[in-house]
Image: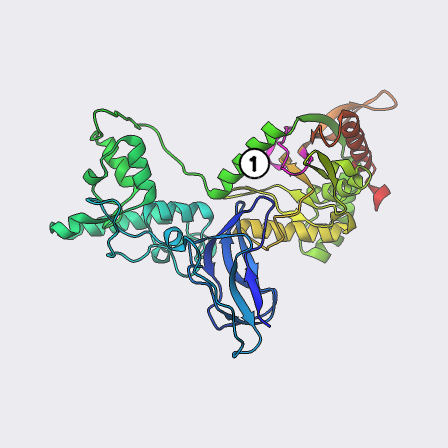
Amino acid sequence: MATEVFVPKMSDHMDVGIIIGWLVKEGERVDRGQPILELETDKAIVELEAPDTGMIRGIRAGVAAGASVPVGETIAFIIKTPDEILPSLPPLEGAAADSTQQPVDIANPGSTVDTQAPLEESIPVRAVPAVRRLARDLGVNLQQVKGSGPGGRILEADVHAHIQAQTQAAKAQPPITSQKSEEAVSISPVARRMAQELGVDISKVKPVTAPGKITKEDVRTYVEAGETLEASPVSIEGVDWMDLTRAQLMTGQRMVESVHNAPQFSLTTSADMTHSLELRETLLTRIESETGTRLSVTGILVLIVANVLKSFPRANASFVDGRVKLHKQVNIGVAVGTEDGLVVPVIHDADQKSLAEITRDLKSLQEKANRLRFGPNDLSGGTFTISNLGMFGIDHFHAIINPPESAILAVGRIIKTPIGMPDDSIALRPIMKMTLSIDHRSLDGMQGAKFLALLKEQLEQPYLIL
């Protein structure tokens, strides 16, 4: 019996996935767990894994680079025998509009002219979402761009260098003056929208950055030349615009939703990290030999926070439809910075893992974040989040709760601070500030204070939980 391949919900807020490219071809044999497709979610690029072993068949029409596929949609099948009969799948609705950009006749904006091949790449290339978005906006085929980053990754500078090379090549060619070539000009959707906002007659804009295609850079150049309509004077001198990636837009929307919908407040305390740092030094060699990576303060934090959450289930909860949903699993999200912004991969069942296992998970998630390639479960299911900015010299800060969670712990740097000791002497001790932001609907100030008190106690006496 054929196994369906569908787009799963890979993060808590994911509704659709944007196809980056297939990693296998129709008819190829795949193994269960093998990455077969790359797609962009609301958070990052993830790799969809084969749900079974067999042969890829019946890839749905329209499921190609650039297409938006709703969560739950079947996109292909995996079969055991070549003669297996498959159900017929209709073409993906709206796929052509999402995955291709057809040339537009500027004399008749509603029509299209088939004079240019789609610009989206047909096979995966190494580029972060921000670079892919830039390429789409500028009408650049990433398959034609040579990457200068690590492992051949394409950087923004590579895209601009490619455009510059094309522009110079175009200037070296004799100008095309035929009426047909003047009418059949492709216009990117971003350029058309930008022209409308700036009051620009798009028919007067000349394609420069990409031959035969008007991009937003052409519109910007036209505006800077002072040729906008008199009724809508616009000046963008001295201003640079940066487009947000889909992940950044979605993150911003969730944070606004969190601030507006959840009554949040914060509590701050400090922990003497003397014994936690001693523990780290004691276990450093052993953990590194087991995992291939050095034990970090974040690893110790994850272990101890997971243990404390078992005593405070309301901090490991979500507020849903007027009730508090207590999660049985302790899944801790760890905020990680990337070239494309912040992502929060999740360590599942953190309360059941050893320090070595947590260290190994952190290393794996960091490597995936560096490549912006995650597995289907890496970004979903979080019940509590830790955001550690201490390595950037931050003393303390207030973090916004990551919905639908009820709490987030913001951690600052460890700094030697003069502290009064029990014998009234003064000593320099490594102190770390922690700020807990909580949803007042799930737990109140007294419960939050008790959570921080137990967390402080266990950080100052970490040997008690080992």
Q: Residue at x 74, y 28 (%)?
A: 270
Question: Looking at the image, which is closer to me, 149 or 249?
Answer: 249
Q: Does residue 408 belong to the magenta stretch?
A: yes
Q: Residue at x 29, y 58 (%)?
A: 117
Q: Secondary structure at mark 1?
A: helix
Q: Residue furthest right?
A: 423
Question: Looking at the image, which is closer to me, 11 or 300?
Answer: 11
Query: Mark 1 highlights which residue?
Result: 254
The part of the chain drawn in magenta is 391-410
Q: Position of residue 375 (x, y in %)?
A: 59, 55
244 lies above or below 125: above
**Can the viewer see residue 415 in this picture?**
no
Left or right: residue 365 versus residue 312 is left
Left or right: residue 110 versus residue 423 is left
Image quadrant where one finds the N terminus: bottom right
Left or right: residue 197 versus residue 392 is left
Q: Residue at x 74, y 52 (%)?
A: 356
Mark 1, other Cα within 10 Å: few <14 / some 14–19 / many ≥20: some
Q: Position of residue 412 (x, y in %)?
A: 66, 32
230 lies above or below 301: above
Q: Position of residue 347 (x, y in %)?
A: 68, 49
326 lies above or below 441: below
Left or right: residue 224 versus residue 70 is left
**Can the viewer see residue 4 in this picture?**
yes
Q: Position of residue 50 (x, y in %)?
A: 58, 64
- The residue type indicated by label 1 comes to Arg
| Dominant secondary structure (helix, strand or loop) of the stretch shown in magenta | loop
Question: Looking at the image, which is closer to me, 385 or 313?
Answer: 313
Q: How is the image coloured?
A: rainbow
445 lies above or below 250: above
